[in-house]
C-alpha cells in the first residue's frame, strides 16, 4: 500500500525523502509528496517520520472466518 501524507501534520523536515530507496518522495510547498508510480511500498518513510504525518492504510477485511 502506498503511504498517505497528512499535509497538516507534515513539517517538511525531509526525513522521508532521505530514506526513500527509489527517491519517490520530494518536497513540494514544504510538504512531502509521493510519486505513486515510483513508490516501492517499503514503508521506510512511515517509520522515519517524527510527526506521524505518513501512514499506510490497510483495507479492513470484511471476511468472517
Image (cartoon, rainbow, N blue to C red):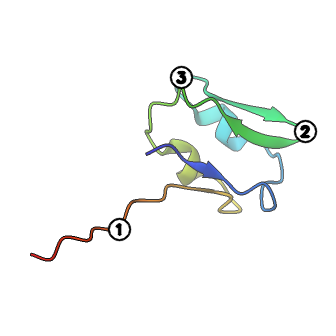
Mark 2 to mark 3 CA distance (whole Å): 21 Å
- Specify few, some or many for label 2: CA neighbours under 10 Å numbering under 14, 14-19, or 20 or more: few
Residue 12 locus on image (x, y percent): 82, 46
Q: What residue is disc 1 on?
A: 60
Determine whether the residue tagged by mark 2 lies in a helix, strand or loop. Answer: loop
Sequence-wise, which precedes: disc 2 or disc 1? 2
Distance between the Cα atoms at labels 1 and 3?
28 Å
Compared to 27, does 53 lie above or below?
below
- Which residue extends farthest bottom? 64
The quadrant where residue 54 appears:
bottom right
Q: Which mark is residue 27?
A: none
| Residue 22's disc number | 3
Q: Which mark is residue 29?
A: 2
First of labels 2, 3 by sequence position: 3
In this view, 52 is above or below 7? below
- Residue 10 locus on image (x, y percent): 78, 54
Position of 20 compared to 41: left or right?
A: right
Residue drawn 71% across the image and 62% down it: 51
Tell which tag, 1 or 3, sits nearer the viewer.
Answer: 1
Mark 1 crowdedness (10 Å alpha carbons): few <14, some 14-19, many ≥20: few
Q: Nearer the viewer, mark 2 or mark 1?
A: 1
Residue name at image x 53 percent, y 24 percent: 37
Amino acid at each position: 500500500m502506498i503511504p498517505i501524507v497528512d499535509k497538516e501534520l507534515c513539517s517538511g523536515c525531509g526525513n522521508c525523502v532521505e530514506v526513500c530507496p527509489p527517491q519517490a518522495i520530494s518536497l513540494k510547498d514544504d510538504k512531502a509528496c509521493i510519486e505513486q508510480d515510483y513508490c516501492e511500498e517499503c514503508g521506510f518513510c512511515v517509520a522515519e517520520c517524527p510527526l506521524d504525518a505518513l501512514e499506510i492504510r490497510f483495507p479492513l477485511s470484511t471476511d468472517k472466518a
